[in-house]
Structure formats: structure tokens, C-alpha cells
């Protein structure tokens, strides 16, 4: 597969990064990753002129690619606490977050439950020759064969703390997950310390629901 790149759009990426800095994203490694990864390749051709605006965009199947600030914020929470290692992403979506994690030097594993998104993201990640390990399935159950993970990022709204994922963290590992109701969630960081889990609570966000056995049901129940 050859990607139609619509130009490099380097100027648009620089402007996006400048906006992220104005919003308070300061981690130099995270900003470098956002300068490097071509977000416009992870959306359809009609949406590419708007790929670097700070807004969520539909990717079909009722799902979105999160706004750049949200991706940068979650990524910064992980990088500042666990800068290297093996990371699991729950909710591959477009593949953009996985590409950002790869650019940061993590060993990346990602799970997507919607077959159409899994296949589309896989085509882009393969075309970019990124060594991201992918699985189609229920992300709320994690990837036990590859556990433990130094970091886990959940890119959808969890109704409660995801205990199965928490138990797949390495000692000292960090889980970043939005937890709340369907209208609003608090970004939550959970760090494993032996058999104890320490919590930090941050700003409110609004994500699509995390569906699966330990998330919302398909009818959001």
C-alpha cells in the first residue's frame, strides 16, 4: 500500500506543536514526536486539510481520532512517569496514538475491537513500517500473554477503574485512563506499587465509551 501523502504538511505540524505549547504541553520528547508523526496520514483524504486543527475528527464506526491536545496530554502523563518500556494501548482507532508512542521509543502493543478500524489502522501502520504489535479483540481484557506492561493508555471512557488492566501493569507501571460517566470523565493515572495502586486525578475530558466485558456494553449500559 502506498500512502497518498498530500504533501508533507510540515508547516501545519509546526503550527500544531506551537498550539500544544500554548496549551501547556512542555515535554520536549512529546513535542518532538508530534512534529515527526504525520497525523494527516491517519484520517481520510477529505479530512486531511483539517488534520492539524485542534479538534476530534470522525474515523467512522462511531469513533474519533482525539484532538491533538488530548493525545499529547495523555502521552505526557505517561512519559513523565514511565519514559521508556513496553506499552499497551487500548483502542487503536486510527493508529495515530500508537504511532506517537512508537516515535517516543516505546515497544508498542495495541488492541482494537472494531474490525474495520483494526484493518484500516493496520494498513497505515504497515505502510509506515512501524513495529507496532496489533490485536483484534476486547481491549478491556488486556493482552495477558504479553503482560506485564510498563504503561497502559486507554483511549476511551471507562465506567470504573479497569482492574484487569491494572493487574497487567509491571511493578512501577502506569495506567492512564479517563474514568467517569458517558458525559464526562476525569483523566486518571494509576501507578502500581507492588500489590498497591496509587491514584492521581486530573482534568475532565469527554471520550467515546470503552466497550467490552469490563467496560460499557454495546448499548452503553
Image (spheres, rainbow, N blue to C red):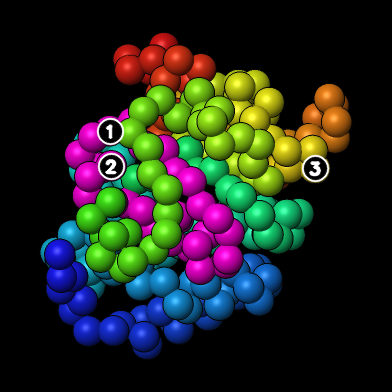
Report how many numbered discs are placed on residues in the image: 3
**Quick check: marks 1 and 2 in contact, CB under 8 Å?**
yes
**Does residue 45 appear left or right of residue 137 in this picture?**
left
The one nearer the camera, 21 or 137, is 137
- The 10 Å Cα crowd at callout 1, few under 14, some 14 to 19, many 20 or more, is some
| Residue 55, position as x, y percentages in the image | 38, 58
Q: Quadrant of residue 138?
A: top left
Q: Mark 3: which secondary structure?
A: strand
Q: Quadrant of residue 221?
A: top left
**Does residue 60 appear left or right of residue 131 in this picture?**
left
Say which residue appears at 68% left-offset and 26% top-offset.
167
| Residue 114, position as x, y percentages in the image | 27, 33
Image height of 54 relative to 175, above or below = below
Q: State which region is magenta.
A: 94-121
| Residue 3, position as x, y percentages in the image | 18, 70
Q: Is residue 105 visible?
A: yes
Measure the alpha-carbon separation of dots 2 and 3. 30 Å
Say which residue appears at 54% left-offset and 43% top-offset.
88
Q: Mark 1: which secondary structure?
A: loop
Say which of marks 1 and 3 sits in front. Answer: 3
Q: Which residue is mark 1?
A: 114
Q: Which residue is mark 2?
A: 118
Say which residue appears at 66% left-offset and 76% top-offset.
28
Image height of 129 relative to 181, above or below = below
Looking at the rendered image, the quarter that the N terminus falls into is bottom left
Q: Residue extending furthest front? A: 145
Query: Is 100 in the magenta?
Result: yes
**Does residue 208 appear left or right of residue 206 in this picture?**
left
- The 10 Å Cα crowd at callout 2, few under 14, some 14 to 19, many 20 or more, is many
Q: Which residue is mark 3?
A: 172
Amino acid at each position: 500500500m502506498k500512502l497518498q501523502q498530500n504533501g508533507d504538511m510540515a508547516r501545519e505540524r509546526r503550527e500544531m506543536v506551537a498550539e500544544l505549547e500554548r496549551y501547556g504541553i512542555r515535554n520536549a520528547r512529546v513535542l518532538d514526536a508530534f512534529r515527526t508523526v504525520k497525523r494527516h496520514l491517519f484520517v481520510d483524504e477529505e479530512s486531511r486539510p483539517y488534520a492539524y486543527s485542534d479538534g476530534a475528527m470522525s474515523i467512522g464506526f462511531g469513533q474519533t481520532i482525539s484532538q491533538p491536545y488530548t493525545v499529547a496530554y495523555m502521552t505526557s502523563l505517561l512519559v513523565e512517569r514511565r519514559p521508556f518500556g513496553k506499552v499497551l494501548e487500548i483502542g487503536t482507532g486510527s493508529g495515530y496514538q500508537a504511532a506517537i508512542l512508537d516515535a517516543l521509543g516505546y515497544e508498542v502493543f495495541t488492541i482494537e475491537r472494531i474490525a474495520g478500524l483494526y484493518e484500516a489502522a493496520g494498513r497505515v501502520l504497515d505502510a509506515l513500517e512501524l513495529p507496532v504489535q496489533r490485536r483484534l479483540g476486547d481491549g478491556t481484557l488486556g493482552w495477558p500473554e504479553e503482560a506485564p506492561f510498563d504503561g497502559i493508555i486507554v483511549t476511551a471512557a471507562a465506567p470504573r477503574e479497569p482492574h484487569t488492566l491494572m493487574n497487567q501493569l509491571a511493578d512501577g507501571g502506569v495506567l492512564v485512563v479517563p474514568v467517569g460517566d458517558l458525559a464526562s470523565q476525569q483523566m486518571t493515572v494509576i501507578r502500581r506499587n507492588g500489590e498497591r495502586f496509587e491514584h492521581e486525578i486530573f482534568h475532565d475530558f469527554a471520550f467515546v465509551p470503552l466497550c467490552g466485558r469490563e467496560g460499557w456494553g454495546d448499548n452503553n449500559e
